[in-house]
Amino acid sequence: PVKPVESGGGSVQAGGSLRLSCVASGTILYSDCMAWFRQAPGKEREGVAAVYIGGGMTYYGDFVKGRFTISKDKAKATLDLQMNSLKPEDTAMYYCAAVRGCLIANSLTASQYEFWGQGTQVTVFS
């Protein structure tokens, strides 16, 4: 199994930036996907960004609109999410997730993912 562990959350003023990192123990295969999801109180978990490990293709939720960048750092073996131009509506618990043999078409669908981290809180204040 894969065990993701997130870090890098915190509080930031609107318009600011945060960088989240995820370290996943276990073996990540080329057929796997890794992703960031978020969940605000009273809302469903939604896909923020995903990467298909084998091809390196990335996918983003519509609300990202060029503000966030997902990347896999081979040297550090981390999955990073650079978040810029943060808005108060980005406030949520952010989760790192992984799945074996992912279906790329469902790369931002939470139900596809098998392995989840505990989450890291991001709070954006105006």
Image (cartoon, helix red, strand yellow):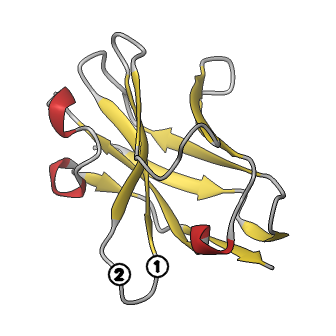
Q: Residue furthest top?
A: 55
Q: Find residue 124 and report its image quarter.
A: bottom right
Q: Which mark is residue 43?
A: 2
Marks 2 and 1, how far apart at CA? 5 Å
Tell whether label 1 touches label 2 (CB within 8 Å): yes
Q: Decide which of 99, 37 is in the foreground and name it.
A: 37
Amino acid tagged 1: Ala
Q: Residues within 10 Å of mark 1 (few under 14, many from 20)?
A: some
Q: What residue is drawn where x is 16% and y is 57%?
A: 111
- Horizontally, residue 29 falls left or right of residue 70, namely left
Q: What residue is drawn where x is 75% and y is 52%?
A: 85
Picture layout, residue 6 above or below residue 59: below
Residue 40 screen position, x and y as percent: 46, 79
Asked if one can make out residue 102 in the rendered structure from this viewpoint, the answer is: no
Q: Secondary structure at mark 2?
A: loop
Residue 54 screen position, x and y as percent: 33, 12
Query: Quarter of the image containing the N terminus?
Result: top left
Amino acid tagged 2: Lys
Q: Find residue 27 and report its image quarter.
A: top left
Label 1: which residue? 40
Picture layout, residue 7 above or below residue 35: below
Residue 67 screen position, x and y as percent: 64, 43
Residue 13 screen position, x and y as percent: 85, 70
- Horizontally, residue 24 falls left or right of residue 33, namely right
Label tally? 2
